[in-house]
Image (cartoon, coloured by chain):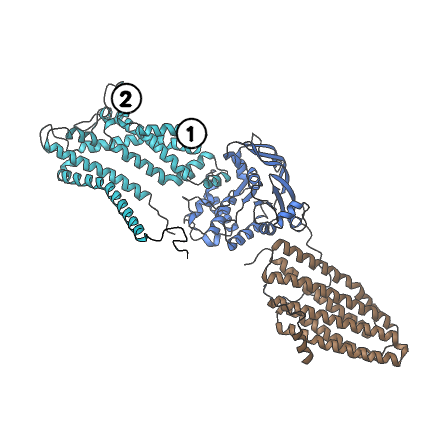
Amino acid sequence: MLDPSNRPPTFAVSVPAAAAAPAAPAPVAFDIRNFCLWYGASQALREVSIQIPSTRVTAIIGPSGCGKSTFLRALNRMHELTPGVRIAGDLRLYGEDLYSPSIDATLVRRRVGMVFQKSNPFPTMSIAENVLCGLRLNGVRDQQLLRDRLEQSLRMAALWDEVKDHLYRPGTSLSGGQQQRLCIARAIAVRPEVLLLDEPCSALDPIATAKVEELIHELKKEYTIVIVTHNMQQAARVSDRTAFFYMGQLVEYAETRTIFMNPANPQTEAYVSGRFG
Amino acid sequence: MKRFFDTELENFRSHLLQMGERAMEQVRLAMRALGESDIALADKVIAADDELDQLEILIDDEAIRYMTLRGPVASDLRLIVVGMKASHDLERVGDEATGIARRSRKLAIEPRLELYADLPRMATIALEMLRDALDCFVQEDEQRALSVIRRDAEVDNLNRILYRRLTSFMIEKPETISRALELMFISKSIERIADHATNIAEEMIYLAKGKDVRHSDEIKQEGKNG
Amino acid sequence: MATPTQLGIPPAGHAWRQAKSRLMVALMLLSSLVVMAPLFLVLYFLIREGAGAIDWNFFTQLPKPTGESGGGMANALVGSLTLLAMAAVIGVPLGVLGGIYLAEFGSDGMNRWIRFAADVLNGIPSIVWGMVVYLLLVVPFKTFSAYAGGAALGIMMIPLVMRTTEEMLLLVPQGYREAALALGIARWKIILVIVVRAAMKGIITGVLVALARVAGETAPLLFTALGNSFWNHNLAEPIAAVPLQIFTYAISPYDDWHRQAWAGALVLLGMILLLNVSVRFISRDRSAR
């Protein structure tokens, strides 16, 4: 129960404006049209067209195997690790075609960072080395910049106070929730434009999950965030827009409150109310 | 741990409290319009009912949104549910106040009946009941809420007494029938306001303790005897 | 609780089953002892026969001319170490790089053939290697040399190091590669700085195991390094090695040389033991949690 603090009842004379005015529409970060992806002969994504707004959180939900992780990885060209993957269609970030042959995939990944389901701090590195790894291995040598970036990133990940006195302990000496926040700090240290989160809380306990959600809420002021989650309550809590995928297709994409309160598509309704399948 | 959506719950509570204050204000002003035969004041009360209706819509909308998107449990959930019900009760209180104001307008242009005297006392008790019920919202005082529930019997009693007096009055002086009838309706309105205050008090007990005390005879019996 | 009859097991014979169980355990214990017996026998004989000949002279003096007593294996010890160093120079880089290729690059089909080739090469008798290197490095230069010996041992190391490196790299979870990739780091940097570093303990272990294996090889050295009774001053000339010296002494008719052969064998065993202990030490579980 909220602390029934000494808040006196307000004596406002007029009725407050009904529901906060909707935020000004955000610019489009990802503009995706008719995007398809094949693993060998089997098609994993079918004609996906979606516009993902900047500085907002977009959640991707759907049953197992619906293509949500596949879609997320397509956003930063992670599929290049897997042989036999073929794509078609248009995928643009702020107008630039990310799959154009003239663009280096490594550069794409510096702009679009990713945090994974299982936290994976590099085992041979300390906390500080982990956070700065992306910068150092991309040639940054300026010690002052590195120190500042280290502190900034750990602060943004709400981890600074917990680790500032032992930055040189191994990254793996932290708890699960802390490791995941370390991975987030590592990802944002390179200052990407977009942050992709692939089920970041599924291996965490509720308190660690709550901390990560608070973090996401803070981060979205500066980053475009796309989060894949199989936890619908989480999608409802943190996201501004939600996309529902099924069998490789984008079934419905709308404001989160619409998806959960009044979805247009009966499949969406069945899924969010737990009656799918 | 503070969550980023806690402000939504705080806003919800403050809107409820706001609605409570407005509803009580409406009743007070309506009774003053009645006592002072102030038509202008009555008109203001009638016009202001719209704000209460809008508040009810806002509160319901916030409640549904919070339930859908935040998945509350335990006391948060009870708060949302109680809030939705209480806002309905308060909106009805507003409607009753509007009804009193309307009837005051009609009575204002006619000579007074001596029986006005009892109504302010009933209204005062009803308003005290509302105040106590709404305060429980902030202070979670089960005893206070229970005292509200018990006082309802007193208001019912006063209402019955007034009915009898008005009835005999109407028989004695038939020319006062239309005015007496208006007074009877006003008395009924105040009695209903007390009922709504009782409902809110019951809801506050549910909010504080998770105990549903509606339709429980023993509490009302205690009131009748006490 | 279900009784034995309910489960379909005959009720009588419970004592017999226990006896059977104890018999099996005893049998297995016996097998383990049988397996360990040769190790103890070897240690026993080596120590009994060779410990007496180990003294300061053994480690510092050159072999005395035929027939004279005394002398040592100083040149053989240094020679063995030299050959091992040269073998490492050839075997480690080529083996590790090959392992990296197998683990991180290449197509499935091609890699299967490479692994098959490596496994076959691992099984080739070491004397065959000696003959190959003889043809390649001894005949054209018309001389036995340390280079040839080192090369023979080094080439033997390559497939072994390659396979163990590959195995260790494959053990590194894919998650680290993905995380590094997602930071926009170039592929080769990911492999060198993150993956190889993570597998470093395992790779070093593999290298040490391979070194331990070739340290004791005699056959390939027979026609490459040849052996030398004196210090080697030029790597393009023959060089002594402990296994070679043991061979020479063992087939001789002199008791003194026999004793020194035993001592050499004991020292060789000690070297290999040392390498194995290092392996254990490096790969010990250091997790404090």
Q: Which chain does the numbered disc 2 sit on?
A: C
Labels 2, 1: one chain: yes
Across and down, in percent, residue A186 comes to 49, 45
| Residue position marked by numbered label 2 in the rendering | C137
Q: In this view of the protein, can residue C134 be seen by the observer?
A: yes
Q: Residue at the spot x=51%, y=44% of the render?
A: A116
Amino acid type indicated by mark 2 = Leu
Q: Which chain is brown?
A: B
* Dot 1 amino acid type: Asn
x and y, in percent, of residue C207 in the image: 32, 35
The numbered mark, 2 or 1, whose residue comes first in the sequence reads 1
Q: Which residue is depicted at the point 30% across and 34% down?
A: C210
In the image, the chain rendered in blue is A
Q: Which chain is cyan?
A: C
Q: Where is A254 relative to B2, above or below?
A: above
Q: Name the residue under label 1.
A: C111
